[in-house]
């Protein structure tokens, strides 16, 4: 649990400066809150104090409520702090008889921003960032933010900030009226002191946010804005309730007044605080941070080396996406292709990725050109002689990769890390003709590599911990969430989810509609169903990986001839604009009635008939039948030590496959259902449909013992 405090100093000018001291980002821990309460009461009581300034020590105002407090209260292990206490604290600032001014530098997030809005003014530095990110944790702003923000900046902008957890910088905050003045860091404290005294002496207005009405839109316009916000919230996340509850709370304050809004906010916050959604998202928050802790690697005292130059072999979709990520985060990149045509195509893909950022307003054209200048295209290995990291991103062909790694060993310096993006090939095969297997590592990105946030770092028994430490650092710097896994077919994500499409094909062969299956999965919260996923990956890749799984796991691969039949007619998925769906330009995927020609042909060849029992399945049952085999395979991944922590698989499922984060990840969701139910259903299906559904020993043992699937296992390797 985070410790912390607030310090108070009273100057000769009569201004008390209360500083939050809880590095690194001055979160509001229990200790900070009680210390702040004490300083607040003392400042109000003392006759030599005329005004108060709130500031954060070390250049950061406040990073919000300590997430550990949330977790502790949810687990009922913390009794001494009440959620409504903080709301009372913010109210006390607003109604105090002495003016409070917030001096904001660095971050003002969540509860920190809400505290500042209860003050009579806010002064910030130019680089300050302000945000209310509570919806990302399954709650709403609970300390007056739903009521004060609309009154300070208007309903439209307030909804945008709250509903999207949008970060804004000081300049925009000043334009909106959230910040009253912008000064340099050196002037911040002095300016805040002067502003507080000006309020005290009536040279500036005494502004109480809850009393402001000039920024609130007229009633009819407000209703339209709120209706639009509700429609957008339901469209973005139809399974989530807390965004709609947040809008209701904001509306209550507009219709019935701020005090009624605060009461509704408090009740809603308390209820959401203990909801399954909040617990799941808090679990994800902690799990994401835990991915950087790997026993036997990050506990050895090693420091990441400064990798300043990266080279990439292959400028296809994967290589160009990786290069885009790297140059966007200030890494110089050398991109190699085998000829001018392929090189130009790769560079053009990178340019298109950057131009997309320009169109969306994420960067200027000038910044785009400066970023592109970090890229150098080459046709040989001459520029690899001073590379610190090489990422091979060619097609999954063993002989080709072996040839490339032999070249890399000859041309790269001895310290250079040699990484491969393979998703299926054993890393030991790739490096078997080299003498540098200790610096060969998997860097498995997911398409499109410049947008999907997951990076699988794959180790063999030869990989040095330093190489892993270095890649973890690179992953962090290019804004990826890394998980470290052991070398095996499919690694963690693809290994877990290979049954996802296979079970769907099993259901299709027995009469179920393609689009009913996909609809059930997207209704559950997956970004795409299994058939749409196959289209996106491409039938060629799907067939190739399927053959690899059949070779390695013959006892649990469902064999369907549907994809090979479609490939014969050059239906290859989204790339050819014909797959299980039709694709026209940038339009959404459209169900393709011609697909049934292949389905009927397959059923005729196999002599299979419609299964009446399967046809009765509702969406919930379809989801279980598609995802329980995924849970089963995830259990094997844990049991074999491919991943050390169940929470790593939760993060892998969310960031790699889009598993809904509000369900906590694949293993967290499995435990919410219970190992016994998962085991019972798989056993039932095994009896009816065969060994494809057979529960693994890990799942069987946990179900029999009543032990959570995510509980630590002794069999997992302590060191990857």
Image: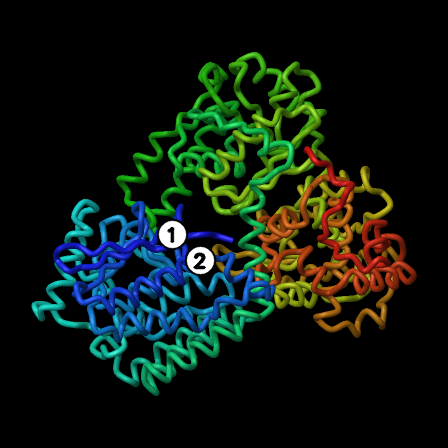
Which quadrant would residue 152 be assigned to in this image?
A: bottom left
Residue behind mark 1: 26
* Residue 116 percent coordinates (x, y): 29, 63
Q: Nearer the viewer, residue 410 or 662?
A: 662
Residue at figure coordinates x 63%, y 56% from the top left: 665
* Residue 365 percent coordinates (x, y): 28, 42
Q: Nearer the viewer, residue 306 or 184?
A: 184
Q: Name the residue furthest bottom.
A: 256
Q: Nearer the viewer, residue 530 or 663?
A: 663
* Residue 708 percent coordinates (x, y): 75, 57
Which quadrant would residue 246 be assigned to in this image?
A: bottom left
Q: Is residue 4 visible?
A: yes
Above or below, 641 against 136 in this view is above
Residue behind mark 2: 29
Q: Nearer the viewer, residue 572 or 318?
A: 318
Residue at figure coordinates x 69%, y 68% from the top left: 516
What quarter of the picture does the C terminus occupy?
top right
Above or below, 526 against 300 in this view is below
SS for tag 1?
Answer: loop
Left or right: residue 630 compared with residue 182: right
Q: Is residue 349 visible?
A: no
Above or below, 526 against 386 in this view is below
Residue at figure coordinates x 52%, y 25% from the top left: 390
Above or below, 234 against 112 in this view is below
Label 1 crowding class (10 Å Cα cut-off): few <14, some 14-19, many 20+?
Answer: many
């Amino acid at each position: 649990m985070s410790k912390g405090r607030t310090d108070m100093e009273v100057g000769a000018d009569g201004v008390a400066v209360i500083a939050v001291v809880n590095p690194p980002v001055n979160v509001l821990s229990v200790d900070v809150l009680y210390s702040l309460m004490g300083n607040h009461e003392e400042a109000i009581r003392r006759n030599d104090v005329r005004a108060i300034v709130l500031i954060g020590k070390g250049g950061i105002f406040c990073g919000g409520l300590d997430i550990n407090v949330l977790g502790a209260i949810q687990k009922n292990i913390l009794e001494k702090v009440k959620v409504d206490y903080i709301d009372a604290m913010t109210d006390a600032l607003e109604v105090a008889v002495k003016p409070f001014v917030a001096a904001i530098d660095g971050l003002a997030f969540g509860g920190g921003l809400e505290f500042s809005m209860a003050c009579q003014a806010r002064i910030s530095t130019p680089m300050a960032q302000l945000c209310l990110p509570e919806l990302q944790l399954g709650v709403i702003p609970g300390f007056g933010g739903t009521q004060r923000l609309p009154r300070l900046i208007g309903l439209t902008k307030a909804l945008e900030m709250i509903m999207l957890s949008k970060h804004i910088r000081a300049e925009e905050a000043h334009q909106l009226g959230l910040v009253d003045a912008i000064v340099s860091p050196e002037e911040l404290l002095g300016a805040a002191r002067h502003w507080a005294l000006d309020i005290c002496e009536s040279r500036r207005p005494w502004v109480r946010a809850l009393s402001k009405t000039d920024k609130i839109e007229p009633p009819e316009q407000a209703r339209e804005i709120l209706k639009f916000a509700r429609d957008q919230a339901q469209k973005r996340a139809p399974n989530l309730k807390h965004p709609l509850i947040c809008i209701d709370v904001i509306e209550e304050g507009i219709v019935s007044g701020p005090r009624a809004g605060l009461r509704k906010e408090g009740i809603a916050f308390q209820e959401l605080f203990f909801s399954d959604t909040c617990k799941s998202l808090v679990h994800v928050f902690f799990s994401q941070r835990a991915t950087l802790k790997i026993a036997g690697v990050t506990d050895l005292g090693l420091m990441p080396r400064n990798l300043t130059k990266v080279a990439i072999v292959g400028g296809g979709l994967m290589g160009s996406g990786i290069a885009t990520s790297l140059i966007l985060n200030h890494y110089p990149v050398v991109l190699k292709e085998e000829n001018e045509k392929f090189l130009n195509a790769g560079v053009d893909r990178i340019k298109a990725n950057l131009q997309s950022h320009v169109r969306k307003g994420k960067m200027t054209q000038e910044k785009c050109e400066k970023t592109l200048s970090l890229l150098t295209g080459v046709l040989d290995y001459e520029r690899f002689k001073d590379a610190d990291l090489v990422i091979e991103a060619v097609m999954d062909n063993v002989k080709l990769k072996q040839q490339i790694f032999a070249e890399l060993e000859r041309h790269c310096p001895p310290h250079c890390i040699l990484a491969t993006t393979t998703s299926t090939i054993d890393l030991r095969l790739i490096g078997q003709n080299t003498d540098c297997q200790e610096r060969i590592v998997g860097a498995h990105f997911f398409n499109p590599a410049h947008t999907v946030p997951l990076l699988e770092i794959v180790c063999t028994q030869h990989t040095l911990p330093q190489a892993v430490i270095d890649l973890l650092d690179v992953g962090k710097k290019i804004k990826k969430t890394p998980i470290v896994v052991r070398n095996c077919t499919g690694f963690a994500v693809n290994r877990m989810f290979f049954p996802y499409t296979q079970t769907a094909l099993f259901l299709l062969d027995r009469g179920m509609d393609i689009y009913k299956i996909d609809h059930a999965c997207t209704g559950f919260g997956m970004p795409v169903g299994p058939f749409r996923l196959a289209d996106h990956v491409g039938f060629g890749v799907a067939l190739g990986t399927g053959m690899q799984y059949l070779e390695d796991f013959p006892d649990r691969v469902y064999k369907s001839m549907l994809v090979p039949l479609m490939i014969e007619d050059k239906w290859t998925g989204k790339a050819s604009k014909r797959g299980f769906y039709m694709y026209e330009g940038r339009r959404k995927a459209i169900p393709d009635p011609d697909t049934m020609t292949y389905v009927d042909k397959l059923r005729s060849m196999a002599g299979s008939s419609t299964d009446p029992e399967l046809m009765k399945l509702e969406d919930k049952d379809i989801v279980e039948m598609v995802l329980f085999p995924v849970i089963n395979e995830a259990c094997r991944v844990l049991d074999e030590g491919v991943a050390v922590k169940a929470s790593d698989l939760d993060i892998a499922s969310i960031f790699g496959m889009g598993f809904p984060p509000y369900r906590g990840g694949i293993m967290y969701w499995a435990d919410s259902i219970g190992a016994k139910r998962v085991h019972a259903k798989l056993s039932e299906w095994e009896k009816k449909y065969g060994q494809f559904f057979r529960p693994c020993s890990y799942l069987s043992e946990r179900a029999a013992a009543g032990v959570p699937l995510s509980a630590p296992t002794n069999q997992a390797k302590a060191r990857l």
